[in-house]
Amino acid sequence: DIAGVEAPQTVDGESLINLFNSADGWRDELLLESWRKKGNVRAPWAGIVSASYKYIVNSGDINELYDLTADPFELQNRAGSSQYTAIEEQLSSRLTEILLEVRGSTSFSQPKGVRGETEFTRFSSLQPQD
């Protein structure tokens, strides 16, 4: 925007111009995503990071929840802990909202602009499908 050049459709994100004027309207969370490439044993995952927590949904594996205030090195996975149930539900819901906002889906289909050969696992409401 600042340079007067229109971004290609394969570029996602928002203009930073509003950030120069005001921080209003920007999310307090960061979306994280990864996809498995052929020959790589890592499964696709999606996550959300806030100032206090990191929540990750792993394909075919356990989910992860870290309390970044109490555990900044992410050594204790709190997913499934009764003490963190409400926080996990809130972050799961927010992750779904953000995925729908930025991708239009919670499935892990290949996003536009991703290059290279990639295998994908699809999610329905962030749960693995067979």
Image: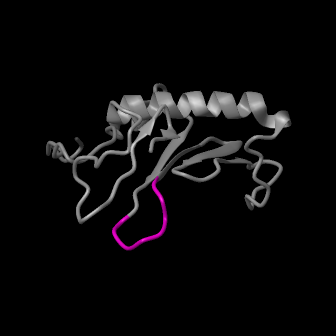
Number of marks present in the image shown: 0
Identity of the residue drawn at 60% across and 53% down: 61
Q: Residue at x 35, y 53 (%)?
A: 120
Q: Is residue 126 visible?
A: yes
Position of 89 with respect to 59 (left or right) is: right
> x and y percent of residue 113 in the render?
22, 52
Query: Which residues fall within the magenta stretch?
Result: 37-44
Is 81 left, or right, of 27 in this rendering?
right
Is 10 left or right of 81, judged from the image as shown?
Answer: left
The picture places residue 55, in percent across and down from the top left corner, at 63, 44
Q: Is residue 90 magenta?
A: no
Residue 41 belongs to magenta span: yes
Q: Position of residue 32 (x, y in %)?
A: 49, 49
At a point 72% along the width and 32% down the height, the residue shown is 87
Where is residue 5 shown, x and y percent of the image? 14, 45
Of residues 122 and 1, the one nearer the viewer is 122
Q: Nearer the viewer, residue 58 or 52?
A: 58
Q: Nearer the viewer, residue 124 or 2?
A: 124
Prevalent SS, magenta region: loop
The answer to whether 103 is drawn above or below residue 33 in the figure is: above
Q: Residue at x 76, y 40 (%)?
A: 80
